[in-house]
Image: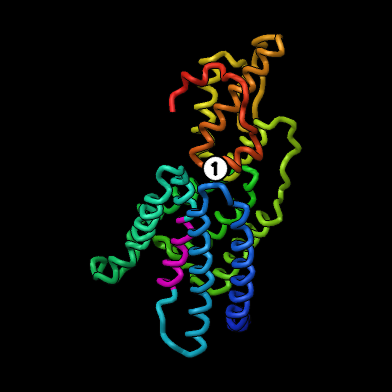
Amino acid sequence: MFLLAQLQHSLDYLTLPAALIMGVAGLVILIRGRKSLKGTSLLGPWGWCLFAWVAVCGAEVLIAVLNMLQVSIPEVQIRYVAAMTLFCPQMSQIGAKRSQTVVWQLVVGVFWLVLCSPLLMQWLGTLNGNRDPGWPWDIFLSVLILAGFLNNGLTRYGITAVCLTIAQILLTYPTSHGTSLEFMSTRAIVSIGFLLLGMALVALDWPSRPQLFHREDRAWLDFRDCYGSFWALRVMQRVNEAAVRFDWGLWLGWNGFSQVEIVGSHPEFREEVSQALVSCLRKLLGDFVDDDWLDARLPRPTQKKRGLEEMEA
C-alpha cells in the first residue's frame, strides 16, 4: 500500500505537463478539423467538442496548479462539471438539422445545466450537502452514454465512439451512487488520453473510406458517418418510402444502395430512376449540407425527375 501511495504521489506531479501537452495537441486537431466541416451544419457540435475538450483538460490543469499551491478545492465537483460537457457534442449532433441548429444550441446549454443540477442542488443546500441524487441519476447517465455510443458506434467512426464511451465511464463512475472508488488524477489523464486518441483517428481519416463506384453510396455514407444513426435512419426511411412509392426498384441499406428488382431495361428508364434518386437525396440532405457539399458528391440532375414533383418536403 505504501508503494502504491508513493507511485500515485509521483504520478500526480506528471498530471500538469500531461494535461497541458495533450490539451494543446487536442486543440490543434480540433482547429484543423474544422475545415472538414465546411458546408455542413456540424459547426455547433464542433463548438461543443471544443468547449468539452477545454473543460476536461482545463479542469486537470486547474486542479494540478492549485494542489501545487496547496489550495483546498472541491476536486470531485470540478471534474464532475467537466465530465458533463462530454455529453453536449452528442446532444448537439441530434439537433444538426439546418432549420433548428441555432436554437438547438440553447437547448444543449440547458441540457448541460440539467446534468450539473446535482451540484447546483448541493450548493443550494437541497440535498443536505450530499451531491449524490441516487441510483436514478446513475441510470440516466448510463442511458445517455449508451445512446451516444449507439448513435455513432455503427458508423466509420465507431472506434472514436468507443474511446469517448470509455472516457465518459471513467469520468462518471467514481461519482456514481454507492461507489467507494477514489477519483484520482491518473484516471482523468487516462480519460483525456482516450479522447485524444479518438480525435486523432478522425484527423488521420482512419479507418479509411471504402472504395465506392456509385455517387449515391458515397454521399450516403459520408452523411451517415458525420451525422450518426439518428439522422441516418430518418433519411433512410424517407428514401425507401420514395423508392417504394415510385417503383425505383432500389433499397437503401445501412451500407449503401442495392437493387431489389428489375424495374426496366431501357437505358432512358434507368437514367430516369437514377436522376430521380439523386434529386431525392439532394432534397433530403439539403437540410444538413449546402450545395457545394452536394455538388462534390451528387451532381445536379439535368433530366426530368420521375415522381419527384410529388414528393413531400
**Mark 1: amino acid:** Asp
Residue that appears at 67% across and 59% down? 200
The location of residue 137, given as percent across then percent down, is 36, 55
Q: Does 284 appear in magenta?
A: no
Q: Main secondary structure of the magenta part?
A: helix
Other residues around mark 1 within 10 Å, as few (<14) / some (14–19) / many (≥20):
some
> Is residue 210 shown to the viewer in this render?
yes
Residue that appears at 49% across and 79% down? 62
Residue that appears at 54% across and 71% down? 57
Which of the 4 image quadrants contains residue 27? bottom right
Vertical comparison of 166 with 122: above or below: above
The location of residue 159, given as percent across then percent down, is 64, 50
Vertical comparison of 295 with 169: above or below: above
Please report the bounds of the magenta region as a residue range: 76-88
In the rendered structure, the answer to whether residue 31 lies left or right of residue 122 reads right
Tell me the SS state at disc 1: loop
Q: Which residue is mark 1?
A: 290
Which of the image's four quarters has the C terminus?
top left
The location of residue 249, given as percent across then percent down, is 62, 15
The location of residue 92, given as percent across then percent down, is 45, 51
In the rendered structure, the answer to whether residue 153 lies left or right of residue 120 reads right
> Is residue 8 shown to the viewer in this render?
no
Which of the 4 image quadrants contains residue 263? top right
Residue that appears at 57% across and 13% down? 247
